[in-house]
Amino acid sequence: MKAHRKQPLYLAFLLHRVSGLALALFLPFHFYVLALSLQGNQKLDSFLHWSQLPLVKFAETGLVFLLAIHLLGGLRLLALENLPWSNAQKNYAAIAVASAFFVALGFLLRAF
Amino acid sequence: MSSSAATSSTGSIAVSVWRGDARHGNFQLFQVPQQPSQTILDVVTWIQRHADPGLSYRFACRVGMCGSCAMMVNGIPRWTCRTHVNKVLRDNRLTIEPLRNMPIIKDLACDMSEFFDKWKQARGQFEGSSTRDQQVAALSPGLPRRRIADAATECINCGICYAACDVVSWNRDYLGPAALNRAWSLQNDERDCAGEQRLRAVAGDAGCHQCHAQQGCATYCPNELNPTASIAGLKRMVSQAWFNKGLACHPGKKCGLGKRHA
Amino acid sequence: MLEMRLYLAQRISAAILAPLVLMHLGLMVYAIQGGLDAGEILARTRGSLFWGSSYALFVIAVAVHASIGLRKILHEWLGWRGALLHGFSWLCLAGLLFAGLRAVAAVVLP
């Protein structure tokens, strides 16, 4: 990574962008799976059966982390742009990452 | 201070310097004697005086006031006259390049035309309404708007924020942190009377809404200004104007900023 | 001033999404225990005006938000511009709206 990018708030930007991109790419698949129920409960259930696999549970945990960090990082940006300026942006970004991590951990613990 | 410590060299530094112009170039290695309290500008000057008189670079004041000597030092934009070698030296090596995001003229001198043109595009000029026959406006430095204007006013046009900004590199039209910071300062100046036109200028497609708050500008600004905060202020100002009165897309059609024309 | 409109649409959709995503996260953490079950999901959503309208709003906001975000990435990272960028943005919005509202209909309509 280029030297000028190695600062916490650039990494926060990158995390927000990459998480948003990954979530956007996941969306069509998410919608497709839900629409399976148009063909009946069994069709959806036969697919949801896959979610019992540990690998899928870890992947879901990853998605939960991405969604949580995109939400919390986005709230930081909304506050940055619309509230009086705060110099604690690095702290907020760190709190967002830590909180998203705990949300994902909570999901993982309940999934198994 | 002992005279020997002030004058004797303490080894040498391997300095990679960018040589070339807008079309082609490469790095050239120089061995430069290390001195106490040596700045990056001292290093570049030593190379020109003792190793290669053909090296081009730009400087003027040498004391951090004129903003002309900024370069990329180990990949980070810095004012070279106030950057001490021992603060940025890694493994006894230095890499010195011209500022990023601007066309290279030759070696370490870049063309700052677009940088200054964008100041004009963002309406960075102060526009007063009083004449020389009127009294000088009395401004209390404690007023809230004056404090905001003052916080953004100490820019020396060095171009470091512009070089640090990835949005500039991704979108060549983007006005950039310095020009927008200047616009924000003027938008909070009680004496300025071009607020409406300036708000329209910064709300354009190359304006404040491009900023992603990566804060490279604020991180590397040598005068510790915060263009990201200024740009956030402009975004708020534009949004307020848009929701309150309808920001005019074309001057003369529906003018929302300040007053509405029939 | 297209960019300003996109900025506003992006931030307004974000503000709408924030509480909905919070709800979605809470529901996921709650519902994952014991595994996902179609009957359990559909029992909650089928015929429910609350879930139907919440998810429809969710889909509309996310379609706007994601297509503007993707547009920005394609422009800044891949250099797309002009008709290609506009066309893709609209296609993205239409595709996400269609697929999303179809999914909502699938889980809500009896």
Image (tube, coloured by chain):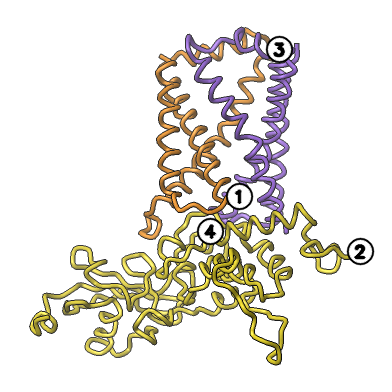
Chain colours: A orange, B yellow, C purple
Residue denoted by label 1: A82
Residue denoted by label 4: B229
Disc assigned to residue B262: 2
Disc assigned to residue B44: none
User: What residue occupies the far right of the structure in this picture?
Assistant: B262
In which chain is the residue bearing label 2? B
In this rendering, the answer to whether A109 lies above or below B161 is above
**Residue drawn where x is 61% and y is 7% of the image:** C39
Secondary structure state at the residue bearing disc 4: helix
Secondary structure state at the residue bearing disc 3: loop
**Residue drawn where x is 38% and y is 84% of the image:** B59
Q: Residues within 10 Å of mark 3 (few under 14, many from 20)?
A: some
Q: CA distance from mark 3 to mark 4?
A: 47 Å
In which chain is the residue bearing label 3? C
Q: CA distance from mark 2 to mark 1?
A: 31 Å
First-in-chain label (2 vs 4): 4
**Residue drawn where x is 52% and y is 72% of the image:** B153
Kindly indicate whether the residues beneath marks 1 and 4 are on one polypeptide chain: no
